[in-house]
Amino acid sequence: MGVLALLALAIRLPYLWLVPRFTDETLEVLHSLAIVRDGTRPLTNYDSYYGALYNYLVAFALAVSGESALAPRVVVLVTGVATVAVTYLLGLELARRLGPSGPAGRSPLHARLVGLLAAALLATNGPHVVVNSHIAWSNCLTPLFTTLACYVLVRAGRSIKSRWPLPLAGLLLGLALQTHPLVVTLLPGIAAAVLLKNWRVLRLPGPWLACLLLLAAYANVLVYNAEHGFDSLWSAQRIQAEYAQDQQAATGYGETVGSMLVLLGRVLGGAVDQRESVAAYLVDPGVLLVVGLSLAGLVLLAARREFVPLLACLSFLLILPAANAKFQTLLTARYLMPVGPLLLTCACYALVWLAERARRLRPDFQRRPLLAALMIGLMLTALPLASLDRYYRRAFERSDTNERILKLVGEVQAARAPTEMLLVDDSIGAELPDTGVTEVRGLEYLLTFGEVPYRMVKPSPGRLQDALDTQPTVLAILNARDAATAAARVRVRVEPLDPRPAVETGRMFDFRLYRLHRTRA
């Protein structure tokens, strides 16, 4: 587990603060910042259909780091690495419980191999690296809790009289529900799996205690809704309606299911790079092989009376399209990631099961089939790294990173006098095609953390002069064209604070930091 965690960390750490650009994660983080700065004690997140668990975790990270704007991404990095470790445990438990060679414990090597390959696949999985381990959304914590809950539920299947697994699973699912309400879609399948395994479990206190602990873990959201007239429900319905009207949303349940399954294939195959068409993903050998093995693993496990993976995934994938119509972009992969580690584990289970079947049919092969399974698993682990590399290279080629705004804010903090206002050209927020993210959001986020007073402006000589009417100097982030226009006016002296010459990029002039001085007419 330690080696796997280090591997996951090594893959996730590069470009943690640069790629992707800051998204609306900033709204959740600023909600958390108020806990530290203003002493607020919220019951829910910025969007009230989330619980506040994530906000308090981020608030702790902010307090420890001295209110670093980058600390929230470290939180999701750590949880992403932890999810890889938990995936190893899930694979180990599934293989011990229902190992390819027969009863649990007969062949520990199989169990280790399933856990190793499952965790390795998640460690190099592009969507889990770029989205769930880089973007500071509450939803990015969901796979950790859901995977841990599945692990506990599989352990609960060892004995109907086990006292702790079912209640612990209920607690974990309640915590997962705080991170995103989509966890509700898993609950019918999980409940059906527990009852199908042994309905007599209802005679014991375990299931009922699990329900109570789930509600207890979600209690802050329940209290909030009791006080605010089910505001979480209305907020969720409003967001759902906005998603349905989005240009990227599917138009019906069938179309939504289709786009969701394509995205799920990308998630399982680790295909994070932008390709010319949907067909390019559908014919990817890595995607096809992992998807096929995942389906085989679900069936094999269900045949051995381990129903949690199959029924949880069915419940999730049937209900989710009715609640969310957006599965077009890479960032929406986070909605499918709660079942990602589970399906990857099923794929590795099927791969090792096939190897064991080959060994039993040909005893003279000895361990060669298992070695072949290991080689195939390592190949599937390596393929997403090439896709991840293409994704990063494309982001830097298009300047679709946080590099520019981090540099600008650093320059502002170094140059700014205590009373100086900052003016920001609002055209810096031009959106790149197919990203859905602008730089303005991230820039405002960093300036808020730095406690820099700023104002977004449409730069014109008149507006810049108006800003200088109240103080002798102001800082301004402008492109070279507007800075030159302002410098031509008598009452404004423009002082470049970046010694490099301004250059024009493929889309616009480079933005630089300037100090504007009021001069006499």
Image (spheres, grey):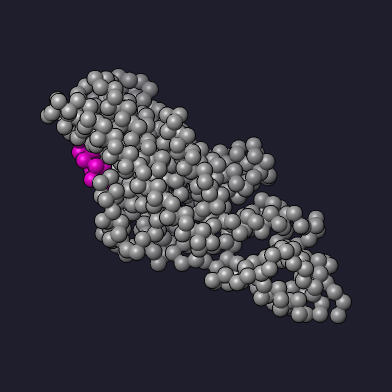
What's the residue at 66%, 69% (across, down)? 502
For the point 36% across and 44% down, the residue is 382
Predominant secondary structure, magenta span: helix
Q: Quadrant of residue 251?
A: bottom left
Q: Position of residue 365 (x, y in %)?
A: 17, 28
Q: In the image, residue 263 lies at what x, y percent?
A: 33, 54
Magenta stretch containing residue 205, yes or no? no
The one of 24 and 391 positioned closer to us in this rendering? 391
**Quadrant where the C terminus lies?**
bottom right
Q: Nearer the viewer, residue 361 or 517?
A: 361
- The residue at 40%/56% (across/down) is 273
In the picture as drawn, the residue positioned furthest to the right comes out as: 520
Can you give x and y, in whole percent of width and height, for residue 162 in the image?
A: 33, 20
Q: Residue at x 80, y 57 (%)?
A: 417
* Image quadrant assignment for residue 313: top left
For residue 275, above or below residue 516: above
In the displayed structure image, the side of residue 419 where residue 318 appears, left or right: left
What is the count of numbered marks? Answer: 0
Is 299 a magenta residue? yes
Left or right for 61, reference 162: right
> Which quadrant holds the N terminus?
top left
Which picture quadrant has residue 292? Answer: top left
**Position of 248 relative to 54 (above/below):** below
Q: Say above or below: 220 vs 519.
A: above
Q: What x and y, as percent, mark residue 195? A: 25, 31
Where are the magenta residues, as a range? Answer: 291-302
235 vs 182, nearest the viewer: 182
- The answer to whether residue 196 is visible is no
Asked if one can make out residue 379 in the rendered structure from this viewpoint, the answer is: yes
